[in-house]
Structures are given as structure tokens and as C-alpha cells.
Image: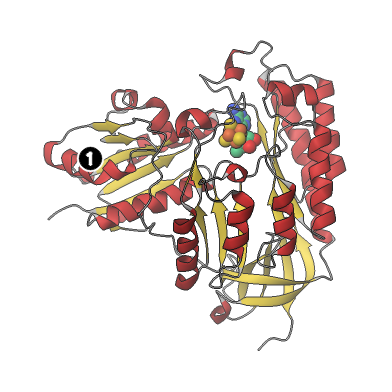
Amino acid sequence: MKSNKFYIRTYGCQMNVADSELVAGILSDAGYQKVNTIDEADIIIFNSCTVRQHAEDRVLGRITAESKRKKQNPNMLIGLIGCVAQRKGKKLLEEIKSLDFVVGTDQYRQLPKIITSCMKRKEHLFADVQNNIENYENIYPVRNNGVNTFVTIMRGCNNFCSYCIVPYVRGRERSRNHKEILHEIENVGNEGFKDVTLLGQNVNSYNDSEYTFPELLKYASQISTIERLRFVTSHPKDISDKVIEVMAAEPKLCEHLHLPMQSGSDRILEKMNRNYTSEKYLSIIHKLQDAIPNIAITTDVMVGFPGETEEDFLQTYNLMKQIRFDYAFTFKYSHREGTAAASYAEQIPEKTRLSRLQKLIELQEQITFEKYQEQIGRTVQVYVEHTSKKSDKELSGRTRDNKIAVFPGDKKLIGTFVDIEIIDATGWTLKGKQINPT
Ligand code: 5AD
Ligand code: SF4
């Protein structure tokens, strides 16, 4: 019997989640069958992240751990795709003997052919050529179950922030054709995904030579089959007044923006090659808050970039305290071979990086706690996603400003929009009760 059941485990960012759905589309078209548990699979594919060393170690460790499955199923194939595959390529086949194939981010169309060759000839194969143009047009992703989804609008990044490996592994920016994007949004809406996130490493520089990002955003938000629209990730240097205007004007655009700040020190921002100052960043925040009342703003912040002094760190700490993000993803700088920052002098000791990180985490936990407490008493609309993890008599939904809220309710409400009053908040979850239950 042909072994054709594949399982994909995804690590890393939303782009990888979307890419796994794309790969599932490519393999399904070629006659392979997607399964939802690793135990059912003949082909196990790991979609990897290399943004920090820890992410890379995790996925490689997992491959080694899962390799013992090959003893029970000698026909099993194990493959690695994504950013680690792109970064390390062929070398990985020598380093990890249980790996059958390694396929980089621009070569997913080759997967069916590669898998067939691996099966037939017991070869170990790789494809890691970066072509900087692959946009995966005409491939329809097999989306994960759920009620919200991503639509990729562009791939790659040209920014070369000095700490970041992404431009090296994902190549140059390229935008998908706007007609394909708008069509895909309409389709996913028809399939029942009413909350859609436009996806790209740097969405604000979208340009398919007909539309730029604000135009795409405007037309996308007017598509009648969806109810909510979001987008990630934005770069502060590229977010224009026009985008803010569209966000304020279009009812389906949600009141949430993820805007990576990275640092509060102008000296460090310059060394990071971010092309904005803390003052500019703050002015964007103010514009957003003026234009969109109750907007939730989330961010990425990094500590321990080479040369970061206690004073630089304090500026980051103070800016976070001033802005009061709804949530912040906090990272300690991780050395990535090949990036500009890897060769900078004054690498910061691990102990210092850790203690700075801890301080930011504690600050943000307190701010998030206060922000969530401020929600009590408000009436908000939630899009019901699933039953809550704790009880199947409770539902879990997402607010327009991207917070999770749980409330008692019947399963049949999954996939619908419900108004709730927030009555409590614990950690990162709001608790509510339905208004006018039917
Ligand atoms: N070390 C630590 N964090 C990093 N990020 C990107 N590269 C690195 C690195 N070398 C963080 C940035 C980015 C987020 C996705 O990951 O904050 O916004
Ligand atoms: Fe990396 Fe900067 Fe590009 Fe984001 S904008 S992917 S941090 S290089």
C-alpha cells in the first residue's frame, strides 16, 4: 500500500502557519492525505523557525526524538522545511541521519516530486535554492480547522534589521497580485472564516505595481463575505497616515495593531538599522490612539542587543511604561550567524540579558493585568472560536481588539458573533456574560 499520509508540525511565526497550510495544499493536490496526529502519519514534516537559536534547537531536538518511529514504520519519511531548512540546507542531511528531505522556503512546489523520489529510491534529497520570486500563486492552501485564518499578501523582507536572519532565509520582498488576494479573502469568507488576517513580514511595503498597502487594505475590508480584517506585521518606518486613515474609516478593520518597537534607545535603534527614533515611534502611537479610540497596541521588544548599556535598557523600560502596550512579546537578543550584528563588538553576557528580560516581563505583566482590569464593565463583541479549554459549557471568543474572552454559552454559537459584558479578568483572559442570550 502506498504510504501517503502526511502530518506537518509547525514552529515559529504566523508565516510558517500559513506556509504549512500552503504545503498541505500542494501535497493534497498531488494525492497525499493530511492527517491531524503524528501517530497516523507515514510522512512527518517539520516546518522550522530559525529566528532565535532556541527555536532552531527545539525543532532539531524534536526530529531526533521522533526518529525512533522509523523503527516501527520502515517506510516512514521525515522531512524538514521552513527557515532552518533554508539556512542550513544540505548540511542537515549529514548532521541528522534520520532526515530524508530538506526543502527551503521557495521550493515547496517540489515537495511531491521529492517525496516520491525519497520513497522509491530511498534517496536523501534537498532543495534549498532561494529564487526570490516564488509567490505560490495558484495554490490554494488547505486551512486548519477554525473560524479565523490568514491570507498571505507578500513574502520576504528587504529591511535587514541588523539582528535578523529573516531576510537571508526568506529572501527579497515580493507581493502577490491583489486580484488573487481579494479573491482568496472572498473565498475564505464563504468557507466560514469571518476573521481574516493579512500576512507578510512587512505588510506596509506591499506593492503589486497596481495597489499599495492602504489600497489593498481598503478593498479587502469591503469584501462582504468577511466580518473582520487584521494585518501583521507592520514596520514603524513604513506605516503611513493613509493606513491609519483606512483603519479608522473601515468598520471591518479591527482596533488592534501589532507594531514592533524593539528598543526605546535611539542609539540602539540605529545600530539595529530600524530607521526610526523613539520619538517617531511614539508619534505613531499617538496618531493611532487619536484616530482609533480604544485601539489595542501590541509589540515586540528585544533586550541585550550588542552594546546595550544599562541606560539604553532603561530607555526601553521607560518607553514601555509610558506607552502601556496591551501585550508585548519580549525577547533576549540571540546571536544569528551571518547577520550584521553577529560581528558587532560588546556582545552582552547571558546573565545580563536574562535579568533585563525578566524586568521587562514583570513590567509588562503588570501593565497587561491593569489593561485587562480596565475592560471590566465594557460591552464587547466576540467572535466565538471554540469551547473553552476548561469546560465545554463555556465558550472562548476573540474581541475585535484581539483579546480572548470566555463566557457561558452553547456550542452552537461557535462561528457566530456575540455581544458580552466583561465581568472579570484573570491574567490574559477576559470573563464575560452574554447580553440578550437567544
Ligand atoms: N534575537 C532575538 N529576537 C529576535 N527577533 C528577531 N531576530 C531576533 C534575534 N536575533 C525578534 C524581533 C522580531 C520578532 C519576530 O523576533 O523582536 O520582531
Ligand atoms: Fe526581520 Fe526587520 Fe524584516 Fe522584521 S522587518 S523580518 S525584524 S529584518
The quarter holding residue 194 reads: bottom right
Identify the residue at the far front of this view. Answer: 210
Q: Nearer the viewer, residue 166 or 332?
A: 166
Element type where label 1 sits in the image: helix
Residue 51, x across and y down, in percent:
54, 33
Give the residue drawn at x 84%, y 71%: 377
Quarter of the picture for ligand 1?
top right
258 on left or right of 55: right
Q: Compared with residue 408, is residue 26 higher up or lower down, i.e. above or below?
A: above
Mark 1 Cβ and ligand 2 under 8 Å apart: no
Give the residue drawn at x 46%, y 63%: 183
32 on left or right of 415: left
Pointer 1: what residue? Answer: 114
Q: Nearer the viewer, residue 405 or 299?
A: 299
Split into 4 quadrants, where in the image is the N terminus?
Answer: bottom left
328 on left or right of 122: right
- Packing grade of label 1 (10 A; few <14, some 14-19, many >=20) is many
Identify the residue at the far bottom of this view. Answer: 438
Split into 4 quadrants, where in the image is the C terminus?
Answer: bottom right
Residue 238: in sight, yes or no? yes
